[in-house]
Amino acid sequence: MSIQQKNAVWTNWSGALTCAPSNLVTANSEAEISAAIVEAASQGRGPVRAPGTGHSFTPIVITDGTMIDIDGHEGLVSADASTGRARVKAGTKIHNLGAPLLEAGLALANQGDINRQSIAGAISTGTHGTGLTLGSVSSQVAGVRVATADGSIVSCSADENADVFNAARVSLGTLGILTEFDLQCLPAYSLRETGGRMAVTEVMAQMDSLVNDNRHFEFFWFPFADDVLVKFLNTTDEPARPPREGGGGMEQFAMVAACEISRFAPFLRGPLQRFLTNNAGARYMGADEFSQKAKVRHAYQAFPSDRDVRFNEMEFSVPLASGPDCVQELAEHMRKRGGNFIFPIEYRTIQGDDIWLSPFQGRDSVSISIHQYAKQDYRRLFDGAEAIFRNYGGRPHWGKLHTLTARELAPLYPHWDDFQEVRRRLDPKGLFLTPYLARLFGEVGS
């Protein structure tokens, strides 16, 4: 049975967003989710939102209506190693999915470097990892079940309700509450991690080979440093070793200390960034030289990084060829006009897809992320960065901060109107549309 709470307060992971829904409902099954939607609609307690784990920085779940917590609707329903298909309940946390999939001989093709999200939240916002031959988490979805505004369940795939499928895989919770997914997985595999420091100039000169010669490549650039931190993940037949417990503790401590020092002594941001870069690892010399130190993990253990220092984030994706120019212009802006910041720029690549509202729809892309410590104002840094991203045709990550509304977004997505038609058909009264989402989709005043 679902449980209802009054006067609850919800806060996102960074602490920047808070709301007080009039009703917080806990639903532990698809039937309970549908019943909670119907009850909220009949009592006029909209907008209805499912909060996930709060790892979005945009206010897509902020509501004074009904929040439906589906954390209890979790787990691996089935897995078939012969087809690679796994059925997963929507409330399943990504960090709880890897081990059961491994037992079934399967693994996700790719995932992001944070694994605390629910699978539904990651899919709804187009969350991704890095790798030019690999798409976002949403691109691994082969089927979806959606609890819609009237409580009915719509099943969709490429062969069934294909228009809903094209919309649902990145939909920000505006079609209804996603309840279950069929994921197309790979046979279980291990990844070997190498990396270190490289000069910015080297990375830019070798970008094509770095991207194309590695399954996964990304780099982190503290703009006041002359080196960047590079990270590579490649498949291997070497046996996976268990991850070291608490291995990132010193790095996290150093990051917190740098953020706090910079808050009160902003003139130290440059020296601190150079210190963090120079002490993060040896200069990268290639995979052979790192063979003794390389980490080999099961894929689900290799992808995530420790992210205990709270921050707010902006991320845009730009066409693949524009990535190097965009990131260099961004770094120059951050040095000259970005104010006080410590976090590095993150640079990743993603294969294009055919999902209507995916930031990667129709084009191979580079995603570029910037972060601001949660205790500091991000507006000065982010405002100037957004203008640069937009000049390169950037599309915002739906769960990360941006100021775009329907007027600016519609031209970026060839299937914008197709998505809108499906959304309005499944939710004709806007039960799932918060004021923020109404602005995003151009429904203000409707």
Image (cartoon, rainbow, N blue to C red):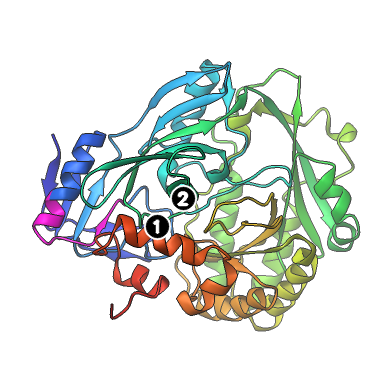
Per the model, the C-alpha gap separating discs 1 and 2 is 7 Å
Q: Residue 368, image x and y in percent?
A: 66, 62
Read off the magenta span: 39-50
Q: Nearer the viewer, residue 341 or 29?
A: 29
Q: Residues within 10 Å of mark 2 (few under 14, many from 20)?
A: some
Residue reaching furthest to the left: 43
Asked if marks 1 and 2 touch (Cβ < 8 Å), the reply is: yes
Hey, which quadrant is residue 384 in on the image?
A: bottom right
- The x, y position of residue 148, in whole percent, is 28, 49
Which labelled disc corresponds to residue 163?
Answer: 2
Task: Determine the secondary structure under disc 2.
Answer: helix
- Look at 63% across and 22% down and name the residue there: 187
| Residue 94 located within the stretch drawn in magenta | no
Which image quadrant: the N terminus?
Answer: top left
Residue ranking furthest to the bottom: 337
- Observer-nearest of 15 and 210: 210
| Sequence-earlier tag: 1 or 2 | 2
Q: Amino acid at mark 1?
A: Val
Q: In which quadrant will I find the C terminus? A: bottom left
Numbered disc 1: secondary structure = helix
Q: Residue at x 53, y 49 (%)?
A: 307
Q: Establish if 367 lies above or below 308.
A: below
Residue visible at 82% across and 27% down?
292
Residue tagged 1: 422
Relative to 166, say whether 331 is above or below. below
